[in-house]
Amino acid sequence: MASSSSAAAFTALERAVVDHVFTLQPGFAVGLGLHQYDGRMPDLSRDGTTRWAERADALLTQLAAVEDAALPDGRRVDRFLLRLLLESPLFDLRESLQLDRNPMWYMGGVSLTPYLIREYAPASERVRAIVQILEGLPKVLDDGRRRLVGPMPKPFVQLAISMGSGLPTHLDEVEAFATQAGLGASVRTARAPAQAAIGQFLTWLKEEELPRSVPDFALGAQRYQRLLFVREGLETPFEAIKKAGSADLARNQARLAAISAEEGVPPAELLRRLGQDHPSAAEVIPTASRFVAEAREFVQSKGLVTIPDPVMVRVEETPLWGRALSTASMDSPGPFDPTPEGVYYVTPVDSTWSPVQQEEWLRSLNRTLLRNITVHEVFPGHYLQFLHLRAARGSLARRVYRSSSFIEGWAHYAEQLTIESGLGAPRHDAEVGQIHDALLRNCRLLSSIGLHTEGWSVERSTRLFMEEAHFDRLPAEREAIRGTFDPEYFCYTLGKLAILSARSKLLASAYGGSLRRFHDTLLGLGCPPVGLLESLLQAGPAS
């Protein structure tokens, strides 16, 4: 049995690990709602990250020295989570060498969105944090130029240039926000050198690094397997994960073929018909708002999962600077945020587009797919998931740890769950839309493994999305390019399959066949790595 002194010592170690992680990733802390980290910028110089890594090594040694007998069972899980919290950034620093080969890691630190959209503090405090970040940005970009060792992977350089080119629009919004609060002058003063540093960084990338960039982006089999462990606690060979993903792809294709045969039209026609039923440009946001209310009512009427009170979610247009990279997204409240307010962003039609472009966008936001997106982003997807995370009173480690495969896996699973529960029945439209998105996620998993372990080219990955997910070439190529720098886009299918596997094994034996009890217990776990999912669920719901 653990003594009170050993429990206190472990709690202190837990705090030390979390604090250390946040010194390297202060934006992570801000996203969780820990606003004492507002405005902080990490030291990304080589000396700075070397010091960080050495301290991380020392903390890992301390974690390893804690004996099992000194910890209750639940805290043994927490020790593993703390280990991954440290090993994950160490992997990025030492093995995948992100700060030495990927300029996007420096561009990504410029997002000031958290300070604009959530009224967690007076505008003056949020503007003060914005100014701190802008003042620290020139050093971060200078550290990047000193560290990045060319030739760099071409997709990384191209995407960094694209990200940086959109930053002036973002900074315009930031300055407008500050001006409304009567603080525009302070942002303008800090913005000038920051924007100059961004311009110099982009010029360097365009003129010096892009011409000599190379197509070498792959992690390789050994590092890919290591990635699965440090992110998801998985030791399953990636070949087995590929096999499971291929089987899910085949299952989804077979179901689409069966619907196609029943309807008497080819799959491509099923998808084309969905696009014909779309809202007008003026109706996009109101339609999304109606779908939020309908999805919430559906979850409640079917008893799928508890919806904790209070619910505070609003639908807004995606900010201008974010529209190039997002169709829709959910800004969920962190577990430490003072309010449970979430913002569901949907990208509207751009009034500067041609009539043909506007129609194409609206077809992509047809009612069926917009409803499926709403399920994924709001109910019972991301927003509901984070309401449960806020309601849980778990340890610090469990409230901080965030598995991408758990988060995206739940939201993707939610799409399938609602179809299984009768959403849209007896018509097949809703199911066709869900399958369309499932095929995309299947191809992401297979593309990730192919690109990083099997020598796939971007062109081969592009063909996968075109042939298996029914994508046109342009969006298929964008998906393929994403896989070069984001191998973790396997997370949707990987997480969904982990949840389905646990459900098939445990729903009857541990949860009496109750989906609500299973889902409430699942979401009460926090966002654990999917490698732990089944073991954490085996005990059944808490009494």
Image: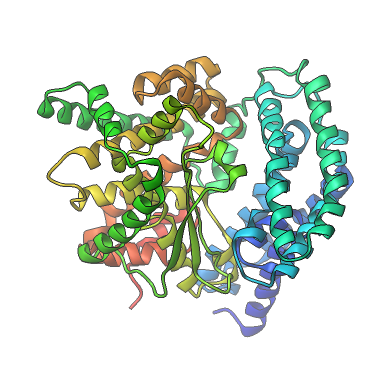
- Quadrant in the rendering for residue 307: bottom left
Q: Give 439 or 115, whichever is nearer the viewer.
A: 115
| Residue 499 shows in this picture | no
Task: From the viewer's perspective, tell me whether residue 139 is left or right of residue 267.
Answer: right
Using the image, determine if residue 325 lies above or below residue 189. above
Residue 515, by quadrant, is bottom left
Q: How is the image coloured?
A: rainbow
Q: Quadrant of the C terminus?
A: bottom left
Which residue is at 55% across, 30% downward? 482
State the quadrant of the N terminus. bottom right
Instruction: State the residue in front, 245 or 458.
Output: 458
224 lies left or right of 259: right
409 horizontally vs 191: left or right: left
In x, y percent, where is residue 22? 72, 60
The answer to whether residue 9 shows anywhere in this view is yes
Q: Position of residue 538 (x, y in %)?
A: 35, 62
Q: Residue at x 35, y 29 (%)?
A: 246
Give the image location of residue 446, x and y in percent: 44, 28
The number of numbered badges drawn on the structure is: 0
The answer to whether 188 appears left or right of 285 in the picture is right
Measuring from the top left, give residue 280's x and y in whole percent.
35, 41
Name the residue: 53% across, 64% down: 333
Name above or below for residue 434 compared with residue 515: above
